[in-house]
Image (cartoon, helix red, strand yellow):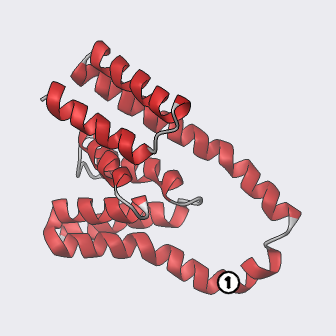
Amino acid sequence: MIDLWYLFLAFLIPGIVGYGGGPASIPLIEHEVVKNYSFLTTTEFGEVLALGNALPGPIATKMAGYIGYDVAGIPGAIVALIATVVPSLVAMIMLLGLIMKFKDSPRVKRMTALIRPTIAILLFVLAFQFFDTSYESAGVVQTAILVVASFLLLEKWKIHPAFVIAGALSYGAIFLS
């Protein structure tokens, strides 16, 4: 029962303060799940994130469902999903009138523009942590191969990220297991 409460808190907090959707809330979820409650290690979180990115749909709900199930079975998945979805649902219902009234406001647009660099920094820190963990567990050569190949596939050849993630998972299964 206590795990369900901690799961609820671990996904409620990013759901409340994760302005900007899934990518903005991923570092917050990682902080709660890995650092605060130790439900997963950084490596396990990275694997869940990669799997979640490879599947269609919102990343935060997929991660909540998987992590909740991993920690406390079906009740854990339900609690984590509710904690992830409810803050946005309540905010949307309560603030729908204000959103429609001020959606074209220059102040709202400036506020959004000011939040973007913070989200970018949080994502950079998360990527650095994953790189550091990968470097420690797989070695510099394997990490460099994956980084360079992923960069080229994504940026030069414009391959869809789901295929790059699937390829990286396959590479890891073949060469790193």
**Quarter of the image with the N terminus in it:** bottom left
Residue 128 makes an appearance in the image: yes
**Quarter of the image with the C terminus in it:** top left
- Report the residue at 68% width, 51% height from top: 115
Q: Position of residue 124 (x, y in %)?
A: 52, 35
Q: Which residue extends farthest left?
A: 177
117 versus 61 height, above or below? above
Is residue 161 or residue 110 the one in the foreground? 161
62 versus 1 height, above or below? above
Residue 176 makes an appearance in the image: no
- Report the residue at 20% width, 68% height from top: 2
Q: Position of residue 88 (x, y in %)?
A: 52, 74
Q: Position of residue 11 (x, y in %)?
A: 38, 64
Q: Which residue extends farthest right?
A: 106
Disc 1 target residue: 96
Name which quarter of the figure residue 55 lies in. Answer: bottom left
Is residue 94 or residue 59 the one in the foreground? 59
